[in-house]
Amino acid sequence: MAAAAPRVSPRFFRRAQAHGFCVPDIPADVRAKCVAGTSTRVLDGRFVADALVAQCGALVAQKKGQGGRVPKLVVVLAGEDPASAVYVGNKEKMFAKAGFESETLKIASCDTTLEGLLSVVGELNARADVDGILVQLPLPAGIPAHVVLAAIDPRKDVDGFLKENMGLLALGDFSGALPCTPFGIMVLLAAHGIPLESKRAVVVGRSNIVGKPMSLLLLGEDSTVTVAHSRTTDLAALTREADIVIAAAGRPLLLGKEHVKAGAVVVDVGMHRKSDGKLCGDVDATFETGVAGKASALTPVPGGVGPMTIAMLLVNTAAAAWSKPLS
Ligand code: NAD
């Protein structure tokens, strides 16, 4: 019997593929899951993220057998922001599950200075056992995040935020670390078999960590991309033309039924805690006033983009570790 042809990865996944990762396959029952009572497919991010964590576990065992290293991330958590503490806790859990190492350096707000943070980053840059450095944002008031981030060695920039990595992406070169949230969205869409070539995509939001890199990644897969932002007029007219809508405005329930055309694929990046304690996104996901029943597919909140972001942090840390020569 002829050997199965190796799967061809999309361009944005080639760096991960070079280290042994593949875009996860999704079983038919997961693919067929719909928002209750509608034909809108649920783009399950938790399933895809778990599959990537499992790949990490298998790859780390294989690399160890070949004398390779166990990837290690150090998170710098300055200040007492409660949401940051939750994010960092989730990252630690996922790293442990993947068999990777992680360490969190906690610095109290009252002990945080720019000089101190630069010195911590300098030490982490020099440590041979550290593959990835993540400075959790936001930093305490008065500390310029861009100065601290710029001090990270680009080879350890597993967030993909530095100009060296963003610059490559802007040039259509996918060999650097890709920003985790848009990278995760691309993997999620690929895993769920959503075609991008020649599709019209509208990205709502132009931040350096989500909207801008998202638009570049979609361009790289030959979508026709429009970026909307806070000064865009008549947002609904724009998003209604899109085959794919990426909602990353950071505004709870900004997009409703009137913002999408029938059959659109909607990715909800937003993450907000409502007064009743429940989470919601930038998209109204209800049937009555929202996109359920009108969109062909939708990412849930939680369980969509969030777990993918952490999974891509694992992949970027692995790529940083396994790009180094064996010691
Ligand atoms: P940001 O505040 O830096 O950027 C928001 C962008 O949205 C800006 O470019 C702004 O111009 C645009 N915008 C604001 N209001 C708008 C409006 N009414 N119409 C059109 N555009 C508008 O936010 P960010 O860091 O890019 O994050 C966006 C959202 O995604 C936030 O809710 C954040 O919590 C969430 N997020 C989630 C994850 C995850 O892993 N799930 C990761 C990163 C960010």
Image (cartoon, grey):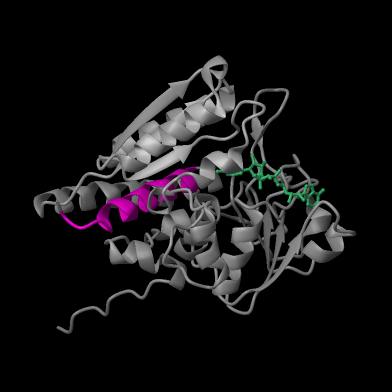
Q: Residue 295: x percent and y percent? A: 69, 59
At x 63%, y 53%, the residue is 208
Residue at the outermost bottom position: 2
Instruction: Quadrant for the N terminus, please.
Output: bottom left
Q: Which residues are magenta?
A: 307-326
* Residue 324 among those drawn in magenta: yes
Is residue 86 in view from this perspective? no
Q: Main secondary structure of the magenta part?
A: helix
At x 35%, y 61%, the residue is 16
* Residue 185 among those drawn in magenta: no
Q: Residue 29: x percent and y percent? A: 43, 55
At x 64%, y 28%, the residue is 278
Q: Is residue 136 left or right of residue 204?
A: left
Residue 325's place in the image compared with 130, above or below, is below
Front residue of 38 and 203? 203
Q: Is residue 221 left or right of residue 92?
A: right
Image-quadrant location for residue 250:
top right
Residue at the outermost top position: 110
At x 52%, y 47%, the residue is 150
Q: Residue 305: x percent and y percent? A: 54, 48
Is residue 306 in view from this perspective? yes
